[in-house]
Image (tube, rainbow, N blue to C red):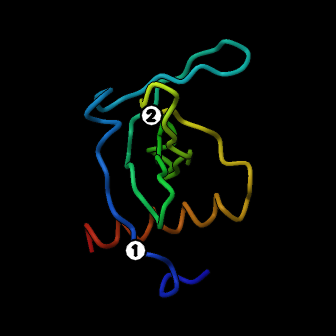
Amino acid sequence: MSLDQMPEVTRLDRLQKLYGAEITLIADDGSEETYRIAAEFRVGETVYAALQTPAMRKADEAAFYHVIDNANGLPELESIDDEDEWEAAAEAYDELLFAEHG
């Protein structure tokens, strides 16, 4: 999908309001890693989060996740398993940054 065909990208801040600038994720093996919330944004009906470790930030990389509401109405992060959707989230993030910083 080219950027001119992409639905509007809207920045959100729900995660940062609830958790602050950083969030700690726990892997399946129990290990923890802290990420900076680089952006939370909506594309169409889907909400994504772009997260960065310090190493990812230096390399100008990000990890993308779905933001979904749990049974209590609180946001949770869910992995994006589909490679095409992951790429679309990355393009939307780039578009958001370009729109904000030219």
At label 2, counting other C-alpha atoms closer than 10 Å, the crowd grade (few under 14, some 14-19, many 20 or more) is some
Give the image location of residue 73, x and y in percent: 42, 31
* Residue name at image x 54 percent, y 22 percent: 33
Question: As drawn, is 88 to the left or to the right of 42?
Answer: right
Along the line of sight, the residue nearer the viewer: 44 or 86: 44
Q: Is residue 49 above or below residue 77?
A: below
Going by the numbered disc 1, the residue's amino acid type is: Glu
Where does the image place residue 84, in percent across and percent down from the top left? Answer: 71, 65
The residue lying furthest to the top in this view is 30
Secondary structure of the residue carrying numbered label 2: strand
In which quadrant is the C terminus drawn? bottom left
Q: Which residue is tagged 2? A: 75
> Residue 26 at what x, y percent from top left?
59, 19
Residue 90 image position (x, y, % from top left): 54, 61
Circle 1 residues within 10 Å: few <14, some 14–19, many ≥20: few
Residue at 47 percent of width and 40 percent of height: 52
The kind of secondary structure element at disc 1 is loop
Q: Residue furthest front?
A: 71
Q: Which residue is mark 1?
A: 8
Q: Amino acid at mark 2?
A: Pro
Which quadrant holds the N terminus?
Answer: bottom right
